[in-house]
């Protein structure tokens, strides 16, 4: 990683790298989603790959493939807190790098820079961010059209930047910020820059309709189903005294419950539940077993869905 550029970005990251590969491998239960997103991203960033496929299987480049060039290389990742959308966004460049056999750079828009809130500053920030990324990738396409390098521009908590201009109470400076975002996205598409923009949000409904219409993909991340919870728990609790049947019971216990219509998120399992199970066993000097796991579940509640109030 390198330090943020001109205060615009948090620490940028170059892919491929071993740390990102380890994070990618840890996304248990999200493999199918990642594979689909990577396939789409690679074609968006390097349309010649689809041309080659069409020529091979159809004997020519069909109109449906040509239509891909009109799509905006932008994804919107939506979903509750802790469901993996930001983690996927941060390591997707690793998977893209391996699939496209190209170096990829992640540019995460700095939360610090976004948070100062001065009038007009957001518009200036977005304009500078797109100008900087566009400059870095203006000459990365070779003569044959293939991208020698690719970029991912990540805008987390995007509803703070791209909120709907239909809101009556929206300040005119915020409207200008949305317009700057649209100009930047459209400019990179027009210039055919190999840069994927990813917007992450907890509130898809708050994102401006014009931004949503431009997205090549809107991926809604859900809380893990019982099969996904079981797969993650098997990975995290391997080597303990827990048996396969115990894991199935724990997967059920971390789902919906009476009086609570929601289960644990990926973050709840990785960062709260399993660490607390481990620490409890450590403090007692015993092995991790079903008794300890159920005891911890009983006192460790899952994160409430975003926007859900206490009853």
Image (spheres, rainbow, N blue to C red):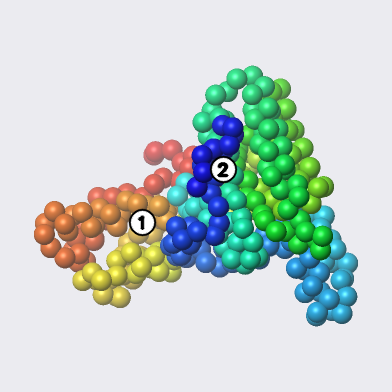
28 relative to 254 in the view: left or right:
right
Neighbour tally class for label 1: few under 14, some 14-19, many 20 plus, Cα within 10 Å: many
Judging depth in this view, the residue of 52 and 254 nearest the camera is 52
Q: Is residue 280 visible?
A: yes
Q: Is residue 77 visible?
A: no
Residue drawn at x 69%, y 50% as measured from the top left? 195
Q: Residue furthest top?
A: 119
Residue drawn at x 75%, y 68% as measured from the top left? 49
Say above or below: 264 vs 288: above
Q: Position of residue 265 (x, y in %)?
A: 42, 54
Q: Position of residue 249 (x, y in %)?
A: 31, 68
Q: Position of residue 48 (x, y in %)?
A: 79, 65
Neighbour tally class for label 2: few under 14, some 14-19, many 20 plus, Cα within 10 Å: many
Q: In this rendering, which labeled residue sits more in front, label 2 or label 1?
A: 2
Q: Position of residue 26 (x, y in %)?
A: 43, 62
Asked where in the image residue 287 lies, by quadrant, the reply is bottom left
294 relative to 283 in the view: left or right:
right
Residue that label 2 marks: 108
Residues tagged 2 and 1 counted as in contact (Cβ below 8 A):
no
7 relative to 232 in the view: left or right:
right
Which type of secondary structure does the marked residue at label 2 adopt? strand
* Sequence-earlier tag: 2 or 1: 2
Q: CA distance from mark 2 to mark 1?
A: 26 Å
Which type of secondary structure does the marked residue at label 1 adopt? helix
Residue drawn at x 88%, y 75% as measured from the top left? 60
Residue that label 1 marks: 269
Say above or below: 53 vs 127: below
Judging depth in this view, the residue of 306 and 110 nearest the camera is 110
Asked where in the image residue 164 lies, by quadrant, the reply is top right
Residue drawn at x 43%, y 38% as measured from the top left? 309
Judging depth in this view, the residue of 277 and 308 nearest the camera is 277
């Amino acid at each position: 990683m390198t330090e943020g550029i001109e205060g615009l970005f948090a620490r940028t990251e170059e892919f491929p790298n071993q740390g990102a590969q380890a994070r990618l491998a840890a996304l248990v239960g999200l493999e199918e989603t990642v594979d689909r997103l990577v396939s789409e991203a690679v074609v968006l960033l390097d349309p010649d790959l689809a041309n080659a496929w069409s020529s091979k299987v159809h004997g020519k480049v069909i109109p449906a493939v040509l239509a891909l060039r009109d799509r905006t290389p932008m994804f919107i990742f939506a979903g509750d807190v802790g469901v993996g959308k930001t983690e996927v966004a941060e390591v997707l460049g690793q998977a893209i790098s391996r699939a496209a056999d190209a170096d990829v750079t992640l540019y995460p828009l700095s939360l610090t820079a976004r948070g100062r809130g001065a009038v007009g500053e957001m518009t200036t920030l977005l304009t500078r961010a797109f100008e900087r990324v566009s400059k870095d990738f203006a000459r990365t396409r070779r003569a044959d059209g293939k991208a020698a390098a690719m970029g991912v521009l990540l805008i987390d908590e995007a509803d703070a930047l791209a909120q709907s201009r239909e809101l009556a109470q929206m300040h005119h400076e915020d409207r200008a910020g949305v317009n700057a975002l649209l100009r930047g996205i459209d400019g990179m598409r027009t210039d055919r820059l190999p840069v994927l923009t990813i917007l992450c949000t907890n509130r898809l409904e708050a994102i401006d309709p014009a931004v949503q219409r431009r997205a090549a993909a809107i991926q809604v991340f859900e809380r893990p189903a019982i099969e996904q919870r079981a797969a993650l728990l098997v990975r995290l609790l391997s080597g303990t005294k827990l048996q396969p049947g115990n894991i199935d019971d724990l997967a059920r216990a971390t789902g919906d419950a009476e009086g609570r219509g929601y289960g644990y998120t990926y973050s709840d399992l990785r960062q709260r539940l399993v660490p607390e199970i481990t620490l409890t066993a450590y403090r007692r000097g015993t092995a991790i077993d079903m008794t300890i796991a159920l005891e911890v579940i009983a006192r460790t509640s899952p994160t409430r869905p975003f926007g859900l109030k206490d009853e």
